[in-house]
Image (tube, rainbow, N blue to C red):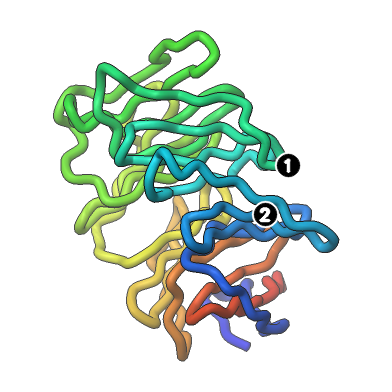
């Protein structure tokens, strides 16, 4: 058991094997999302679904923020696929006139896009094919990762985490380096750097948390933290005092 705030502890629950190349997270219904040999999988407690599109090359990223509108991004072909909860294709979005390097889910029928040509973050409605908001041109340089919710977008750079609202305005900047980050909610973020974990919220941080292992990917849902490393998922339960 370990702690990273005065009133929050994580207690180890179990570890489970997962034969995967990449782990994309767990949703609130305890379904796992991952890829193996460039096939995207969703496993429920009773069933496995899969999706593959060999013509689009390698899967670059997956957003499971909305399990009814899963976002699979194929960067090499500038294409986003929207899938339903059984991994059937809902939408295929091919961006012909701009280069997209990062994608994340936003609100209903919406995506956060990083436009490499203009070096800006865009909030895009894929039903109306319109840009709802965007940052200033060349305002976001060399982003490495993008995650989103209906209200906010988080962009990782080499030495910052930048937070934008859905008007395209930067509302927060965290100045430190890290490997991965996980959204606990709109106010709390868990970072890891090597085997060190940190909690940051809108009031304080980073609060350090020591662990004895590394994580290739992390996920947080229903007060559980999932750490993927070496084809295993380590599951911890959040305890609030």
Which of the numbered marks, if any, corresponds to residue 217?
Answer: none
Q: Is residue 95 above or below residue 210?
A: above
Residue shown at the point (46%, 90%) measured from the top left? 212
Residue shown at the point (66%, 41%) measured from the top left? 87
The C terminus sits in image quarter: bottom right
Residue 40: image x %, image y %? 56, 52
Front residue of 87 and 170: 87
Q: Is residue 223 above or below residue 79?
A: below
Name the N-terminal-most of marks 2 and 1: 2
Residue shown at the point (27%, 51%) measured from the top left? 144
Label 2 with label 1: CB-CB less than 8 Å: yes
Residue 79: image x %, image y %? 40, 31
Front residue of 93 and 214: 93
The N terminus sits in image quarter: bottom right
Front residue of 26 and 55: 55
84 on left or right of 218 = right
How many numbered circles are shown? 2
Q: Secondary structure at mark 2?
A: strand
Q: Residues within 10 Å of mark 2 (few under 14, many from 20)?
A: many
Residue 10: image x %, image y %? 63, 78
Q: Residues within 10 Å of mark 1 (few under 14, many from 20)?
A: some
Q: Give the residue at the far right of this rendering.
A: 46
Residue 214: image x %, image y %? 42, 81
222 on left or right of 25 = right
Residue shown at the point (17%, 27%) measured from the top left? 117
The Cα–Cα distance between marks 2 and 1, rounded to whole angstroms, is 8 Å
Mark 1, residue position: 86
Q: Secondary structure at mark 1?
A: loop
80 on left or right of 220 = left
Mark 2, residue position: 42
Q: Quadrant of residue 164?
A: top left
């Amino acid at each position: 058991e370990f702690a990273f705030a005065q009133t929050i502890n994580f207690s180890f629950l179990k570890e489970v094997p997962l034969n995967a190349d990449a782990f994309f997270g767990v949703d609130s219904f305890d379904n796992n999302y991952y890829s193996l040999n460039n096939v995207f999988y969703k496993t429920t407690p009773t069933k496995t679904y899969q999706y593959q599109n060999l013509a689009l090359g390698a899967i670059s990223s997956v957003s499971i923020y909305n399990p009814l509108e899963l976002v699979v991004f194929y960067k090499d072909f500038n294409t986003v696929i929207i899938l339903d909860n059984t991994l059937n294709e809902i939408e295929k979005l091919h961006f012909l006139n701009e280069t997209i390097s990062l994608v994340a889910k936003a609100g209903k029928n919406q995506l956060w896009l990083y436009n490499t040509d203009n070096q800006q973050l865009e909030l895009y409605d894929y039903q109306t094919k319109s840009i709802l908001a965007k940052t200033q041109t060349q305002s976001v340089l060399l982003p490495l990762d993008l995650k989103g919710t209906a209200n906010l977008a988080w962009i990782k750079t080499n030495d910052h985490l930048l937070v934008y609202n859905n008007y395209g305005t930067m509302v927060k900047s965290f100045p430190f380096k890290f490997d991965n980050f996980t959204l606990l909610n709109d106010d709390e973020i868990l970072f890891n750097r090597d085997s060190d974990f940190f909690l940051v919220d809108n009031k304080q941080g980073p609060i350090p948390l020591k662990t004895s292992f590394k994580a290739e990917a992390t996920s947080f849902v229903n007060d559980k933290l999932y750490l993927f490393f070496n084809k295993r998922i380590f599951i911890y339960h959040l305890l609030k005092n």
